[in-house]
Every structure is written in C-alpha cells, then in structure tokens.
C-alpha cells in the first residue's frame, strides 16, 4: 500500500509541475542545471569524441569551439583519412589528408564549403543544448507535456523553428525532479508542416561531462523513430 501511495503522489507531483510550468519556464530551469554560470554564450573549449556505428570502424573527432572569436575546427580521423573542417567567422575550408600514403599529404582543399558550416552548426547546436534553444528563430511551445518514454515519465518541451532556420520539429525530455535533459527527438515535416512520425531520430543521453562548468551529456545513443533501429553511439572521452 505504501508503494502504491508513493507512486500516486509522485505522478500527481509530475502532473502538477507540467501544468504549472510554461515552456519558457521549463527551459530556464533546464539551462540553470546544464549551464548554471551562463558560460555557454562565451564558450571556449575542446571535445574529443569517439563515434561507434554498427559494422564500421570507430571515428575519432577532435572539436575546438571559440564562440567569442567565431572560430570552429573539427578534425576527424576515420580509417586512412583525416579531414579538417575550419570555420573563421563565415569563411570555411576543408582539408583532406591520406594518412596511409607514403608521405602524408593534403589530398584536397575546398574553400567556403557549405559542409564545414554545417559541421559547425551541427556540433555547436547539439553540444550547446538546451542553451541553444534561446537562439533567435527558435519557437518554444508554451505548453509543457508529460510523456512516458522507455518506461519513465518526462516533462517534454516542443520546439519549432522559423522557416529560414529549419523545418524539423524537436522534442526535449527532461527529468521532472532534476530538470536534466535525458532525451531529444526530432521529426521531419511535410509541405503543410505536418509531422511525419516515420521520420527522424531519437537520442538517449547518459552520464555527464563537464566543460567550463557546463554539464554536457557524455554518451549519446542514436535510434530511428520509425523502428527503434540502433544507429550508433558517440562518447566524449575528454
């Protein structure tokens, strides 16, 4: 009986939090947990990441981000190739080197390449969450939902984006007691803006990695929404 009453009280507590909090209020609480000193806005730091995918060799990535100077660099080592993506403000360059050649030399150089810009935006977005949800062009739904995912109850924040930013719809799952982000999920939309439930992915976040007093997920596991197919895991090593 005590267990049943405790469970009911917990569920009532979660429901109350979801009803009382607006989307912006939930976001503010989550940011306070992940970036308590407001350091993301002037972030300067490095991340080393190992990506493992089924039937593929591990991919090593070294990322350097300096938001104040608008500098980004990503070095990826995968089998015999090393690719470097550099962005200084909005000037971009990609270098590719064959590490197994008799003398390692630059295979190609591409300037002002859109892929380097994409890499910068991709990594600063994902590792800057949930703080990046304050960016201009991001629209936070005022309603906070309560959902069960993988057997656990979450407070869920919905985010859409201005047309010039993106068309995907994102959902962010926060622990109702700690406000820590534990899952994010995105879906594609059709021309009318309707969500395609068979599209997109969900990402399970675990462990914690601290950089400049910012709490980032150390481990991310990626899955397709449509069939729960496992895609890969990336881990911050240092």
Image (tube, rainbow, N blue to C red):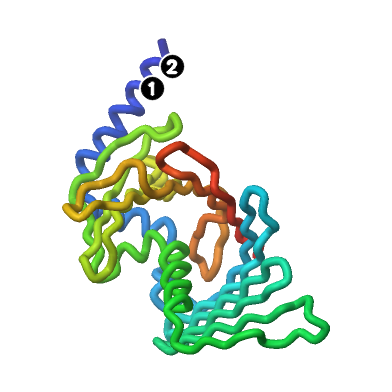
State the image coordinates of residue 131 (x, y, percent, origin top left).
37, 64
Element type where label 2 sits in the image: helix
State the image coordinates of residue 72 (x, y, percent, origin top left).
50, 80
Please determine whether, in this image, residue 151 is positioned above or below residue 114: above
Query: Who is closer to the viewer here, 132 or 119?
Result: 119
Image quadrant of residue 177?
top left
Please determine whether, in this image, residue 204 is positioned above or below residue 93: above
Name the quarter where the C terminus is drawn: bottom right
Query: Who is closer to the viewer here, 198 or 175?
Result: 198
Q: How many marks?
A: 2
Please determine whether, in this image, residue 4 is positioned above or below residue 24: above
Categorize mark 2 by other alpha carbons within 10 Å: few (<14), some (14-19), many (20+).
Answer: few
Residue visible at 62% across and 72% down?
76
In the visual, does 15 lie left or right of 84? left
Q: Which residue is mark 2?
A: 3
Q: Which residue is mark 1?
A: 7
Residue visible at 65% across and 63% down?
59
Element type where label 1 sits in the image: helix
Image quadrant of residue 39?
bottom left
In contact (CB < 8 Å): disc 2 and disc 1: yes
What numbered label is drawn on residue 41?
A: none
Q: Is residue 36 visible?
A: no
State the image coordinates of residue 150 (x, y, percent, origin top left).
45, 33
């Amino acid at each position: 009986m005590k267990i049943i009453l405790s469970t009911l009280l917990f569920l009532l507590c979660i429901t109350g939090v979801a009803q009382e909090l607006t989307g912006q209020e939930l976001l503010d609480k989550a940011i306070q947990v992940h970036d308590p000193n407001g350091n993301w806005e002037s972030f300067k730091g490095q991340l080393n990441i190992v990506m493992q995918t089924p039937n593929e060799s591990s991919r090593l990535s070294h990322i350097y981000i300096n938001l104040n100077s608008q500098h980004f660099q990503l070095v990826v080592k995968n089998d015999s190739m090393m690719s470097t993506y550099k962005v200084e403000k909005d000037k971009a360059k990609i270098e590719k080197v064959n590490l197994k050649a008799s003398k390692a030399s630059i295979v190609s150089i591409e300037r002002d390449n859109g892929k380097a810009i994409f890499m910068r935006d991709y990594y600063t977005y994902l590792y800057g969450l949930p703080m990046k949800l304050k960016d201009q062009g991001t629209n936070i739904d005022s309603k906070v939902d309560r959902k069960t995912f993988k057997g656990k109850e979450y407070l869920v924040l919905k985010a859409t984006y201005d047309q010039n930013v993106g068309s995907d719809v994102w959902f962010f799952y926060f622990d109702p007691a700690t406000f820590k982000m534990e899952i994010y999920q995105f879906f594609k939309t059709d021309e009318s803006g309707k969500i395609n439930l068979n599209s997109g992915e969900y990402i399970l976040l675990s462990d914690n990695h601290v950089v400049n007093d910012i709490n980032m997920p150390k481990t991310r596991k990626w899955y397709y929404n449509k069939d729960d197919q496992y895609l890969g895991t990336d881990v911050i090593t240092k």
